[in-house]
Amino acid sequence: MNSVLDFTATSHYYGQNMTGVAVIDYGMGNLRSVAKALEHVAGASTIEVTACAERIMQADRIVFPGQGAARDCMAELQRLGLDKVVREVVRTKPFLGICMGLQILLDCSEENDGVPGLGIFPGRVQRFPAQMRDSHTNDILKIPHMGWNQVRQTTAHPLWHGIAQDSRFYFVHSYYVNPADPMQTAATAQYGVDFVCAMAHNNVFAVQFHPEKSHDAGLVLLANFMRWNGKV
């Protein structure tokens, strides 16, 4: 595989013009790992982990990571006033959601007896069914889904550039997204059931897996994001 920085520029990329990335800090998730992975592919761009609404609004592109419970995520976003900020920046800036940063974009989640999301993507988040079995061994599958899994790209997108079909990414989750619009599905994976693991619409791309923990394929995706202008 070529270096993660060895890309051919296309109309989907700004090249060297973009200078600032805001990683939204609402107190949940391993932000250091995300920031370090972005720094690895950032070139001359700056990476800032911040909860400051003004700094987020000023950034050229936005990364929205997260892990933990949907209820706690929404509560912290609202406490910090960042729910309004996220709704604003997803309208105009290249935006990457990671793990909870995907799930919270939907209308609602089954988690914690029902939690409203940001409603940016129509659809809901649901728990993996109990007693799922491995299709090859018939063993009962553990929840959460944790570890490496193949990702099946279902649509062409600039963030998939240079990433082979069925590349493996790292997952940790008990819930998965069920979008109302199948055209917004960008990739699926299989764990007892086929589930959507990436969504895309206009300038927004969001994934269930953790690119910052996914070695070469994850770094390629992050490098693609650093070059993406939000157009498809």
Image (cartoon, rainbow, N blue to C red):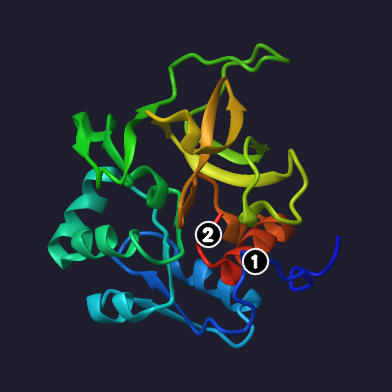
Residue under label 1, please give it: 11
Q: Quadrant of residue 225?
A: bottom right
The crowding category of the residue bearing disc 2, from other C-alpha atoms within 10 Å (few below 14, some 14 to 19, many at least 20), is: some
Q: Residue at x 54, y 47 (%)?
A: 209
Q: Position of residue 102 (x, y in %)?
A: 41, 47
Amino acid type at mark 1: Ser
Residue nearer the viewer, 194 or 232: 232
Instruction: Give how far apart the Cα atoms at labels 2 and 1 are.
Output: 9 Å
Question: Could you tell whether 5 is left or right of 87 in the image?
Answer: right
Q: Position of residue 60 (x, y in %)?
A: 43, 77
Residue nearer the viewer, 57 or 33: 57
Q: Residue at x 30, y 46 (%)?
A: 120
Quadrant containing the C terminus in the rendered view: bottom right
When the figure is inspected, residue 210 is found, relative to residue 106, above or below; the finding is: below
The crowding category of the residue bearing disc 1, from other C-alpha atoms within 10 Å (few below 14, some 14 to 19, many at least 20), is: few
When the figure is inspected, residue 226 is found, relative to residue 149, above or below; the finding is: below
Q: Quadrant of residue 48?
A: bottom left
Residue under label 2, please give it: 231
Task: Compare marks 2 and 1 and give the one earlier in the sequence.
Answer: 1
Residue nearer the viewer, 38 or 225: 225
Q: Position of residue 73 (x, y in %)?
A: 26, 52
Secondary element at image label 2? loop
Q: Residue at x 53, y 16 (%)?
A: 132
Q: Residue at x 65, y 57 (%)?
A: 218
Secondary element at image label 1? loop
Residue nearer the viewer, 156 or 127: 156
* Labels 2 and 1 touching (C-beta < 8 A): yes
